[in-house]
Image: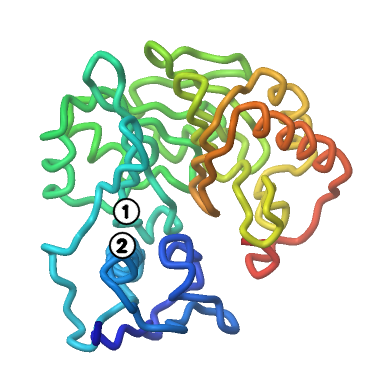
Amino acid sequence: MDNDWYVDDRCTDCDVARQLAPDLIAQVGKRSEVVRQPRDAAEERAMQAAAFACPTRSIRPASRRLDPAQDPFPLALDATVSLCGHNSPQNAGANSYLVRRPAGNLMLVDTPRWSRALATQYAALGPVTDVLLTHRDHAAHGRQYADHFGARLWIHEGDLDAAPDADRVLRGTGTVEIGPGMVAHPLPGHTRGSVLYVADERYCFSGDSFYWSRTTGDIEVAESVTWYSIEELSASLARTAGQLRFEWLLPGHGDRKHLPGDQMAERLRKLTERAARLTPRPIDFTAVRW
């Protein structure tokens, strides 16, 4: 392969590319850099995925042009969940997911950048009935996607000002069944209206409440970018963790991870214990342990 990939100066150090091509792209200082060119077809596909996910479109081949035919998204993680890619700078570069339900419909958890072409592509996979927002930071484009699909837009009342025209508003801290097998667990902490969505007791869409850290090899909370209250996040985990069963951790930021359910439950229990000892700290994006 001889594409001479590079990262341009628009990079915001969001970690998305490093999730998708960890052997090729690394953090150098306060940004991502290509540290090695692809050596085979699999690595070329990983670099293409990183390029089409990058919210600032900073990852480029020498030609400076991405070939739409190489776009791998939506990228199937398994038969149920696909990663959308095309991360939006208006959603802080967050990941979003398509979730296929047993009845044949799909749900969209958070959103990629708005594109009618992307929305049409998703709709061709099946009827998209619900757009589920995990919190205010990821609320951009929710209404556009929901209107395109004729879907219901969901958000928690704590973050309602970010999507005041939502069709369904989650309230309080009680669990809510969105549809068969899809349950919302309000988890105030990162923001006042943060929500986890758990599908089939197998997939946990955690928004920014917690994530898998490549640095620590464990589930972590991003205490240095907890906008609302780390004490509330600790209390939310203590109230909710025992109810959660899942095998896939699928966050908005940070890495994804698939482990047996009992291992995830034990790691979440230990996270809850660690979170109880955390104290408020100034917002500092550079302190997150991706």
In the image, 252 versus 144, the foreground residue is 252
Q: Which mark, residue 49?
A: 2
Q: What kind of element bears circle 1?
A: loop
First in sequence, mark 2 or 1: give its number. 2
Q: Is residue 50 above or below residue 236?
A: below
Residue name at image x 51 percent, y 22 percent: 184
Count of numbered circles on the image? 2
The reply, left or right, for residue 220 in relation to residue 21 is: right
**Side of 37 where 249 appears, left or right:** right
Residue at left 57%, top 80%?
30
Callout 2: SS: helix
Residue 244, percent from left and from top: 63, 22
Q: Position of residue 177 (x, y in %)?
A: 46, 12
Q: Quadrant of residue 261?
A: top right
Distance between the Cα atoms at labels 2 and 1?
8 Å
Q: Quadrant of the N terminus?
A: bottom left
Name the residue located 49 percent from the left edge and 35 percent from the top edge.
205
What kind of residue is marked 2?
Ala
Residue 51, image x, y percentages: 30, 69
Quadrant where the C terminus lies? bottom right
**Residue under circle 1?**
85
Residue visible at 17% across and 79% down in the picture = 65
Residue toward you, 266 or 141:
266
Q: Amino acid at mark 1?
A: Gly
284 relative to 153, above or below? below
Residues marked 2 and 1 touching at CB (< 8 Å): yes
Q: Residues within 10 Å of mark 2 (few under 14, many from 20)?
A: many
Side of 19 where 75 appears, left or right = left
